[in-house]
C-alpha cells in the first residue's frame, strides 16, 4: 500500500474502480470456468493460471499510475476464477475427509512462510534507507522467482486428466445449461435456498475489501515497520491455529469451527475502528494486533472450503465452484464504489457497515447450512473383551457383578484406580470392571458396557433392606440422605470421566447400543427379557391367588 499510495498516488476511488474491474472480469468468466476446467483438464488449467498469476508482479514493476493496476486486477481475477475449480478438484483428489481441513491450512501456511521474513525485512530496509522506488525492483524479482517456482511445481504435479471433448457453441450452451440445472437439482436436499442466500449475501463484503490499506495509511499512519509486521503476524496467527482447527473440524464439525473463529475478525475490526481516535492507547501498533487476530480467523477458511466442496459429489465440483462464485459476483459490482462513497462521509463507515452485515449473514443465514462432516464409526468393530458395569448407588452394580462372577467365572475389579483400570483394559484375559472402576472404563471400546439405573424410591428401599441385613435399622429419610451423598460422588466421577449427567437420562427399562450389539442379539435379549418378566408376573399372581 505504501507503493500504491506514495509512488502511484492511488485514491479511494481508484481502489473502488480496481475492485469493480476485478469483479466484472470474474463475473464474465465464472459461469464458464467449470466447463473450461472440465474441457481443458484440471492440470492444464492449473499450469496456465499459475503462470498467469506471475504477470501482476511485472505490471506492478512497469506501472506509472492506476491504469496498469486495473489491468493487473483483471488478470489476477481471470487467473483465480479459472484456478479455483481446478484447485478444488486437486484438493479433493489428494486429500481424505478427516485430514482435508488440516491439509488446506497446511498449504496456506507453507505458501505464507515467506511473509514471516520478507515483509518485515523489506519494511526495515525502506525505513532505514528511505528509498521507496526500490520496491519496483522487488516486484521484478518476485516476477522472476514466481516463474521459477511455478515451473518446478507444474513439473512435479501428477494428475490424471479427464477432459471432455470441446463441443460446438450450440452444444456448449446446452451442456452448460444442463450442467447447472443438474447442480441446482443436486442442491435440493443440501440446503439449496440457504446456500444461495448465503452466497448472495457474501457480496456485501466487497464494501470495505479494498479500503483497509488506505485506512492504515491515511487514518492510523503507523511506522513503516508496522507494514512489514502485518503480513508476518497474520501468517503467525494462521500457523498457530492450524492444529487446533484441524482438531475442531473433526470433533465439533466444519460449521461450528467457522462460527467459533469468525468473531476474531470482528474483534480486530473493532480495535482498528477504535484506533481512529488519536487518544487511543498505542494506536499506531493496533494494526499488528488486529492482523494477528485476522490471521487466527483466516484459519477457518480450511473448514469453510472443505464444507463447500463436500456438499456435492466430485464430478459436480467445477460447476459447483462456478455456481458459488456467480452469486457474490453479480451482486457485488456496485459495492466497492458504495464503499468509496461511505469513505467520503466517514472513513470508519464502510468497515462498520460491512461488519454488521457480515454478522447478520453469518448468524442469520450460515447457521442454517447443513453440516457436511459426519463422523462415521470404523468399518471393523472390536469384539468386547471385558464386561464393564457401572451405575447409581444401590442400582444393583455389586449384586450383578457377584452373580456374573459366580456364573461365568470372570474375576472382578471394582477399585476406582485409573492406573489399575488402564492396565486391566490392556490385558488379554477378561475381567468384570465395575463400580468406580466401571465409570473410568466406560468410554473405552474394550468391553461390553452395562449401565444400571433405578428410581430413587427403589434404591432407598434397597438401602434399607441392606441395612437390616447388616443389623442396622435406620429411618427412610436417613437412608435417602446417605444415598443422595453417594449419588453426588458418583455424579462427579461420571462428569469427570464421561462428560455426562445421570440426572438428564430419559425414562427406559433397557437401553442397547446397536452400534456394538448386533440386531439378532438385541432380538434374543428382548425376547428372553419379555418372557422372563411375563413368567415372573404370572408366578406372583399365582402366589397371591393361593394366599387368598
Image: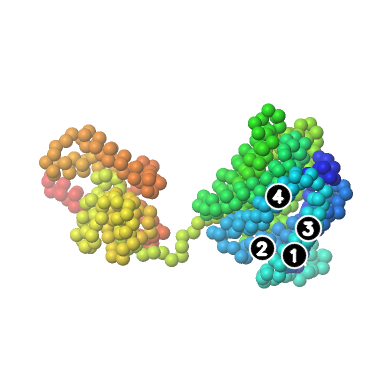
Task: Of the two numbered discs 4 and 1 on the same chain, state the one appearing first in sequence.
Answer: 4
Question: Which numbered tag is attached to residue 89?
Answer: 2
Q: CA distance from mark 4 to mark 1?
A: 22 Å
Which quadrant would the C terminus be assigned to in this image?
top left
Question: Which numbered tag is attached to residue 148?
Answer: 1
Residue drawn at (22%, 37%) of the image: 479
Q: Position of residue 387 (x, y in %)?
A: 30, 58
Question: Which numbered tag is attached to residue 141?
Answer: 3
| Residue 482 appears anywhere in the view | yes
Q: Classify 10 Å Cα crowding around label 4: few (below 14), some (14-19), many (20 and above).
A: some
Residue drawn at (68%, 61%) of the image: 87
Q: CA distance from mark 4 to mark 2?
A: 36 Å
In this view of the protein, which residue sits in the foreground, 168 or 492? 492
Name the side, left or right, on which 474 lies relative to 321: left
Q: Position of residue 485 (x, y in %)?
A: 28, 38
Q: Nearer the viewer, mark 4 or mark 1?
A: 4
Residue drawn at (16%, 41%) of the image: 467
Q: Classify 10 Å Cα crowding around label 3: few (below 14), some (14-19), many (20 and above).
A: some
Q: Nearer the viewer, mark 2 or mark 1?
A: 1
Q: CA distance from mark 2 to mark 1?
A: 24 Å
Q: For residue 459, what is the image quadrant?
A: top left
User: What kind of element bears circle 1?
Assistant: helix
Q: CA distance from mark 1 to mark 3?
A: 11 Å
Name the side, left or right, on which 459 lies relative to 380: left
Task: Of the two numbered discs 4 and 2 on the same chain, state the one appearing first in sequence.
Answer: 2
Q: Nearer the viewer, mark 3 or mark 4?
A: 4
Question: Which numbered tag is attached to residue 121?
Answer: 4
Query: Is residue 263 shown above or below 87?
Result: above
User: What kind of element bears circle 4?
Assistant: helix
Task: Of the two numbered discs 3 and 4 on the same chain, state the one appearing first in sequence.
Answer: 4
Amino acid at each position: 500500500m505504501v507503493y500504491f499510495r506514495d509512488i502511484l498516488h492511488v485514491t479511494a476511488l481508484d481502489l473502488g474502480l480496481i475492485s469493480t474491474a476485478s469483479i466484472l472480469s470474474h463475473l464474465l468468466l465464472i459461469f464458464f470456468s467449470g466447463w473450461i476446467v472440465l474441457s481443458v483438464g484440471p492440470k492444464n488449467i492449473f499450469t496456465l493460471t499459475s503462470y498467469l498469476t506471475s504477470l501482476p508482479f511485472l505490471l506492478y514493476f512497469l506501472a506509472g499510475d492506476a491504469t496498469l493496476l486495473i489491468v493487473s486486477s483483471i488478470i489476477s481475477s481471470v487467473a483465480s476464477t479459472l484456478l479455483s475449480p481446478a484447485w478444488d478438484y486437486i484438493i479433493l483428489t489428494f486429500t481424505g475427509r478427516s485430514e482435508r481441513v488440516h491439509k488446506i491450512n497446511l498449504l496456506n501456511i507453507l505458501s505464507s512462510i515467506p511473509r514471516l521474513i520478507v515483509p518485515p525485512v523489506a519494511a526495515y530496509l525502506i525505513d532505514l534507507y528511505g528509498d521507496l522506488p526500490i520496491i519496483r525492483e522487488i516486484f521484478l524479482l518476485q516476477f522472476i522467482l514466481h516463474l521459477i517456482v511455478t515451473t518446478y511445481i507444474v513439473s512435479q504435479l501428477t494428475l490424471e486428466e479427464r477432459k471432455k471433448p470441446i463441443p460446438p457453441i450450440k452444444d456448449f450452451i446446452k451442456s452448460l445449461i444442463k450442467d447447472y440445472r443438474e447442480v441446482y437439482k443436486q442442491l435440493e436436499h443440501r440446503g439449496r435456498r440457504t446456500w444461495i442466500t448465503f452466497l448472495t449475501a457474501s457480496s456485501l463484503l466487497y464494501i470495505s475489501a479494498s479500503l483497509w490499506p488506505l485506512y492504515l495509511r491515511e487514518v492510523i499512519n503507523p511506522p513503516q515497520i508496522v507494514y512489514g509486521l502485518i503480513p508476518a503476524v497474520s501468517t503467525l496467527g494462521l500457523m498457530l491455529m492450524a492444529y487446533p482447527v484441524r482438531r475442531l473440524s473433526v470433533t465439533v464439525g466444519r460449521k461450528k469451527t467457522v462460527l467459533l473463529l469468525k468473531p476474531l475478525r470482528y474483534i480486530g475490526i473493532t480495535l482498528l475502528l477504535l484506533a481512529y481516535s488519536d487518544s487511543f492507547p498505542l494506536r499506531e501498533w493496533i494494526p499488528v494486533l488486529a492482523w494477528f487476530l485476522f490471521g487466527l480467523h483466516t484459519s477457518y477458511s480450511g473448514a469453510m472450503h472443505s464444507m463447500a466442496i463436500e456438499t456435492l459429489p466430485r464430478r459436480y465440483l467445477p460447476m459447483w465452484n462456478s455456481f458459488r462464485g456467480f452469486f457474490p459476483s453479480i451482486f457485488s459490482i456496485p459495492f466497492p464504489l458504495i464503499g468509496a462513497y461511505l469513505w467520503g462521509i466517514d472513513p470508519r463507515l464502510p468497515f462498520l457497515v460491512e461488519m454488521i452485515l457480515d454478522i447478520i449473514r453469518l448468524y442469520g443465514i450460515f447457521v442454517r447450512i447443513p453440516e457436511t462432516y459426519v463422523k462415521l464409526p470404523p468399518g471393523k468393530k472390536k469384539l468386547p473383551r471385558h464386561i464393564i458395569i457401572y451405575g447409581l448407588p444401590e442400582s444393583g452394580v455389586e449384586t450383578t457383578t457377584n452373580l456374573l462372577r459366580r456364573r461365568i467365572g470372570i474375576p472382578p475389579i471394582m477399585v476406582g484406580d485409573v492406573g489399575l483400570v488402564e492396565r486391566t483394559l490392556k490385558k488379554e484375559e477378561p475381567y468384570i470392571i465395575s463400580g468406580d472402576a466401571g465409570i473410568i472404563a466406560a468410554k473405552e471400546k474394550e468391553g461390553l458396557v452395562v449401565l444400571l439405573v433405578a428410581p430413587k424410591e427403589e434404591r432407598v428401599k434397597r438401602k434399607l433392606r441392606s441395612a437390616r441385613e447388616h443389623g442396622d435399622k435406620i429411618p427412610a429419610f436417613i437412608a435417602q440422605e446417605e444415598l443422595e451423598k453417594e449419588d453426588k460422588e458418583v455424579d462427579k466421577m461420571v462428569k469427570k470421566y464421561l462428560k455426562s449427567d445421570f440426572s438428564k437420562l430419559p425414562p427406559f427399562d433397557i437401553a442397547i447400543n446397536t452400534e456394538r450389539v448386533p440386531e439378532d442379539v438385541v432380538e434374543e435379549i428382548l425376547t428372553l427379557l419379555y418372557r422372563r418378566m411375563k413368567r415372573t408376573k404370572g408366578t406372583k399372581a399365582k402366589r397371591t391367588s393361593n394366599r387368598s
